[in-house]
Image (tube, rainbow, N blue to C red):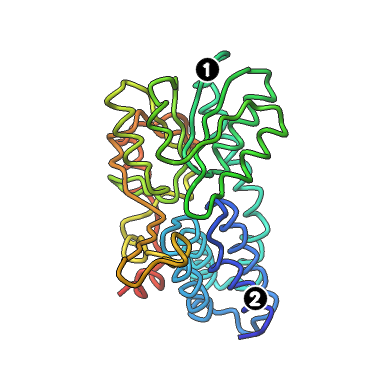
Amino acid sequence: MDARLSELLEDVTSDRTSGAAQVTRKAAALIAGWIEMEPDPLPRNFCELGRAAIKGQPSMAPVINLINDALLELENAEQSHRNYRESLLRFVDGFTDRQHESISQTVNAALSLIHPGDRIATHSYSSTVRDLILEAKKQGIEFELVLTEGRPNLESRTLAKELGDAGVEVEFMTDMGLFAVLDEVKTVFVGADAVTRKLLINKAGTCAVAARCRQLGIPCYSLMTSEKLLAPGLEPLFSIVEHSPAEVWASAPESVKVRNIYFDQTPLDALTGLACEQGLLRPAQIEALIEARETSRLLAGSSD
């Protein structure tokens, strides 16, 4: 593999702190690099690269979906005898605009859930939740935000600084500290790394937060774009993997087994709703959207 292409692939697979939207933009840059450097851009050649990207980020549905959609574009070009390179280049060129539009529509769908004087909370880092909070502030809505740090990599520190610099009143605390103040919160917003027909996959702790919100009668919404929806044919490519124990405890004694689990699974019916481009939806509506998604024959065939 070309050294520059290897670097672009590493940029995708090694990212452990960015939100799913940012990692997917890196995957789009990888595809653009492949188009530029690959002398024979056939679907089967791209599938090999796509599998490598998915193997590095198997818990992020947007990366899986981007590879799937790019392969569908190549497969359709093959069937209609269109130029492979031109077809995939058009697909990648439009990716950023499509992503920005999807996020904007999702933010607009959720904006009515934040009211003046609210005390809201979010768990860990989500770029879509960040955009919602910034848009609410931009529109002059005054509110307080409770933000958890996002162990083990503390990715929310960057978010806390960004939101604080934008004038948002941020209260920053440990992940478990949220449960001590959750009864003071009006609404909770979480992101999404993947959504299957029955489950939301997001930062570890999301399931407990949603369950406690339900006990307290506090609305809990997931913000997601349709790129987070995982078609049934792509589910075998998805997995929740454990990461380096050193991120949790670098100097742990040998007698202690340290586990580093980034994501957990939350039943969709534990949430109040899910905000996406189509508006505020219930789990049954999300399931219908997922069932309608198309799967690349090459990628589905590579999952076993």
Viewer-nearest residue: 60 or 31? 60
Left or right, 7 with respect to 279, comes to right
Q: Could you say whether the residue bearing mark 1 is in a helix, strand or loop?
A: loop
Q: Position of residue 80 (x, y in %)?
A: 53, 69
Q: Amino acid at mark 1?
A: Asp
Residue at the spot of label 2: 7
Q: Position of residue 156 (x, y in %)?
A: 56, 44
Q: Which residue is rendered at x = 57% and y = 66% of the image?
A: 12
Q: Which residue is rendered at x = 58% and y = 13% of the image?
A: 116
Q: Pick out the residue farthest to the top.
A: 117
In the rendered image, the quadrant that contains the N terminus is bottom right
Determine the image quadrant of residue 90. Answer: bottom right
Q: Residues within 10 Å of mark 2 (few under 14, many from 20)?
A: few
The residues tagged by marks 2 and 1 sit, at their Cα atoms, a distance apart of: 44 Å
Q: Amino acid at mark 2?
A: Glu
Q: Could you say whether the residue bearing mark 2 is in a helix, strand or loop?
A: helix
Q: Which residue is rendered at x = 50% and y = 25% of the image?
A: 120
Q: Position of residue 184 (x, y in %)?
A: 43, 20
Q: Which residue is rendered at x = 52% and y = 30% of the image?
A: 146
Residue at the spot of label 1: 118
